[in-house]
Amino acid sequence: MKALGFAMFVETHPRLQVEVRVGMRYKPDLVSLSADGAIEFWGECGLNTTRKTAWILKHAGAKRLVLFKIGQNSGQISRQLRDAIPEKYRTAGRLRLVNFIPEIRDLTATKQIATVSSDWFETVVI
């Protein structure tokens, strides 16, 4: 999922890196820092709790937080996050869910991923 997320966002976030500590409670799976060290993009892949998501939105100052999942019920996840995290932390599309199709493992198992086809995922703004 990290490779997929990287391929999806490296063009818009050319400083995107994988698993770099940012001096906080949590280490992002994907992160892009501005020249002055501000967090432009934070990506979380796989399992993470609503509590962790809320903490990142409240304390990390990330301009965008993207959660990457595979074959999950995006409607249910979105409702849970909206119910648990106040809107002031989710404004302007700051929190997004990218939900890959269950077959993504088979589609990418033997390939280097340069681009991610739009039919491999859905995006939900939370």
Image (cartoon, grey):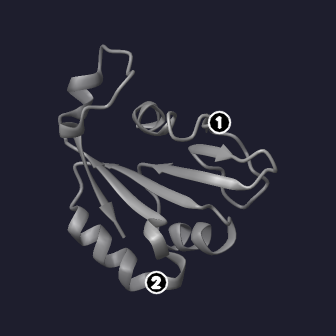
SS category of the residue bearing label 2: helix
Quadrant for the C terminus in the image: bottom left
- Amino acid carrying mark 2 in the image: Glu
Q: How many marks?
A: 2
Q: Which residue is mark 1?
A: 15
SS category of the residue bearing label 1: loop
Q: Residue at x 30, y 61 (%)?
A: 124
Q: Foreground: 98 or 15?
A: 15
**Residue 45 x %, y %:** 45, 47
Q: Residue at x 60, y 34 (%)?
A: 14
Q: Foreground: 46 or 9?
A: 9
State left or right for residue 117 relative to residue 63: left
Q: Residue at x 22, y 68 (%)?
A: 75
Q: Cα distance, mark 1 to mark 2?
A: 28 Å
Q: Which residue is mark 2?
A: 87
Q: Residue 8: which quarter of the image?
A: top left
In the rendered view, tell whether residue 126 sits above or below residue 84. above
- Amino acid carrying mark 1 in the image: Arg
Earlier-in-chain disc, 1 versus 2 = 1
Q: Residue at x 64, y 44 (%)?
A: 32
**Residue 113 x %, y %:** 38, 22
Q: Foreground: 120 or 76?
A: 120
**Residue 65 x %, y %:** 51, 59
Q: Foreground: 53 or 35?
A: 35
In the rendered view, tell whether residue 108 sits above or below residue 10. above
In the rendered view, tell whether residue 107 sits above or below residue 102. above
Q: CB of mark 1 within 8 Å of CB of mark 2?
A: no
Mark 1 crowd level (few <14, some 14–19, many ≥20, 10 Å Cα): some
Q: Residue 123: which quarter of the image?
A: bottom left
Quadrant for the N terminus in the image: top left
Mark 2 crowd level (few <14, some 14–19, many ≥20, 10 Å Cα): few
**Residue 92 x %, y %:** 46, 71
